[in-house]
């Protein structure tokens, strides 16, 4: 099982924050009537460190607004979808197109497989995203005793 760094954990918490707040939870599947969904929401939201991530994001917004927009567009507002492509480089590939990789001076055809494609606003500046992550990590260490934690269900998926 792979261990996630504090930075990776904060990123995954930010990516899944909207789903944890959502009544359908992390699985995006309906779970019965409204009262059931509210119970599921409370369970997932409070199982991980989502409340602390929200607190850190509010501080980021108040102290570094220019970095806040870039971070939220990159991780909270990005669009993720599963598609077919090269599992080695993560590039989406067209059906019937030969995708090649050079391994030990030899060309090798790579079969298409499922990959996660992520899209975000083209105006996002990754240096500001990195500065925002630096702030979030430092703010977390200053105010929280426990390291950031993912919900158990999400951690099992990511650490596999």
Image: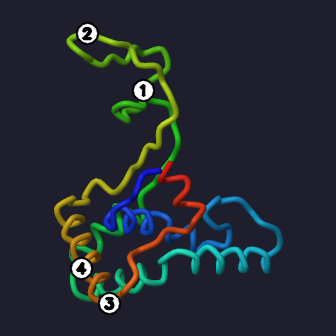
Q: CA distance from mark 3 to mark 2?
A: 52 Å
Q: Nearer the viewer, mark 1 or mark 2?
A: 2
Q: Residues within 10 Å of mark 4 (few under 14, many from 20)?
A: few
Q: Is residue 88 above or below residue 70?
A: above
Q: Residues within 10 Å of mark 2 (few under 14, many from 20)?
A: few
Return the disc, 3 or 2, that comes first in the chain's sequence. 2
Give coordinates of residue 55: x percent, y percent. 39, 86
Give coordinates of residue 131: x percent, y percent. 19, 70
Q: CA distance from mark 3 to mark 4?
A: 9 Å
Determine whether label 4 and label 2 are within 8 Å by CB: no
Mark 1 lies on a secondary structure that is loop
- Determine the image quadrant of residue 42: bottom right
Which residue is located at x 75 percent, y 63 percent?
Answer: 30
Q: Is residue 106 above or below residue 126?
A: above
Residue located beneath label 4 in the image: 138
Return the disc, 1 or 3, that comes first in the chain's sequence. 1
Q: Nearer the viewer, mark 1 or mark 4?
A: 4
Determine whether label 1 and label 2 are within 8 Å by CB: no
Give coordinates of residue 158: x percent, y percent. 49, 53
Which residue is located at x 32 percent, y 90 percent?
Answer: 143
Residue located beneath label 3 in the image: 143
Residue located beneath label 2 in the image: 106
């Amino acid at each position: 099982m792979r261990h996630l760094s504090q930075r990776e954990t904060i990123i995954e918490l930010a990516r899944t924050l909207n789903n944890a707040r959502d009544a359908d939870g992390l699985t995006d599947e309906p779970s019965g009537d409204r009262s059931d969904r509210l119970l599921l929401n409370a369970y997932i939201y409070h199982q991980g460190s989502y409340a602390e991530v929200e607190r850190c994001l509010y501080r980021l917004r108040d102290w570094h607004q220019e970095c806040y927009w870039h971070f939220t567009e990159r991780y909270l507002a990005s669009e993720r979808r599963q598609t077919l492509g090269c599992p080695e480089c993560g590039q989406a590939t067209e059906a019937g197109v030969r995708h090649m990789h050079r391994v030990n001076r030899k060309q090798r055809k790579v079969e298409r497989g499922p990959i996660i494609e992520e899209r975000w606003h083209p105006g996002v500046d990754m240096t500001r995203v990195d500065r925002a992550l630096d702030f979030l990590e430092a703010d977390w260490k200053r105010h929280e005793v426990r390291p950031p934690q993912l919900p158990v269900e999400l951690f099992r998926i990511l650490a596999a």
